[in-house]
């Protein structure tokens, strides 16, 4: 992921939460759509914390793997989807994953 990658279309918090609810049922397409909508912002969070593009790139995949695993069987994310992803990103960037 780089800052020059194509930006995803704007998505509301409700849309993101709906995608996560679908992903929790095993809908891989919904999770891919969630990734596409949120990865640029999550990457920006990681880059602002680490200051190193390669480190932000390396962390990004692990964050989404964790999100996928934590969403299985849940009815909804524990808070709005983007807020939840930012919290996971902060924890990973701080080395507390």
Image: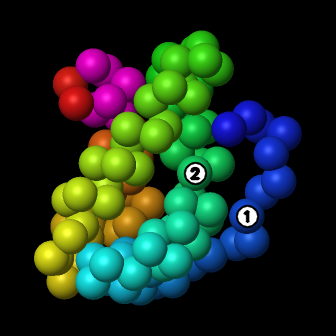
In-image side of 41 versus 97 (left or right)? right
Q: Residue at x 74, y 71 (%)?
A: 9
In-image side of 49 versus 7 (left or right)? left
The picture places residue 80, in percent across and down from the top left corner, at 35, 69
Q: Quadrant of the C terminus?
A: top left
Q: Which residue is mark 2?
A: 39
Rendering quarter of residue 37: bottom right
Label 2 packing within 10 angstroms: few (<14), some (14-19), many (20+): many
Say above or below: 69 vs 81: above
Q: Residue at x 64, y 48 (%)?
A: 40
- Residue 69 or residue 40, whichever sits in front: 69
Q: Could you give the CA–CA distance between mark 1 and mark 2, rounded to whole angstroms?
A: 9 Å
Q: Which residue is mark 1?
A: 8
Q: Residue at x 44, y 60 (%)?
A: 82
Q: Quadrant of the N terminus?
A: top right
Q: Residue at x 38, y 66 (%)?
A: 81
The picture places residue 83, in percent across and down from the top left corner, at 38, 57
Label 1 packing within 10 angstroms: few (<14), some (14-19), many (20+): some
Rendering quarter of residue 26: bottom left
- Is 21 within the magenta? no
Point out the stretch of residues depicted in magenta. Answer: 90-95
Magenta stretch prevailing secondary structure: helix
**What colouring style does the render use?**
rainbow
The picture places residue 93, in percent across and down from the top left corner, at 38, 25
Disc with the residue nearer the chain's start (1 vs 2):
1
The picture places residue 85, in percent across and down from the top left corner, at 38, 52
Please report contact status of discs 1 and 2: CB closer than 8 Å, yes or no: yes
């Amino acid at each position: 992921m780089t800052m020059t990658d194509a930006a995803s279309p704007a998505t509301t918090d409700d849309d993101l939460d709906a995608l996560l609810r679908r992903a929790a049922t095993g809908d891989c397409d919904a999770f891919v759509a969630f990734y596409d909508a949120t990865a640029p912002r999550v990457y920006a969070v990681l880059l602002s914390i680490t200051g190193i593009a390669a480190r932000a790139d390396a962390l990004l995949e692990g964050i989404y793997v964790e999100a996928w695993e934590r969403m299985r069987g849940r009815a909804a994310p524990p808070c709005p989807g983007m807020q939840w992803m930012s919290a996971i990103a902060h924890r990973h960037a701080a080395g507390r994953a």
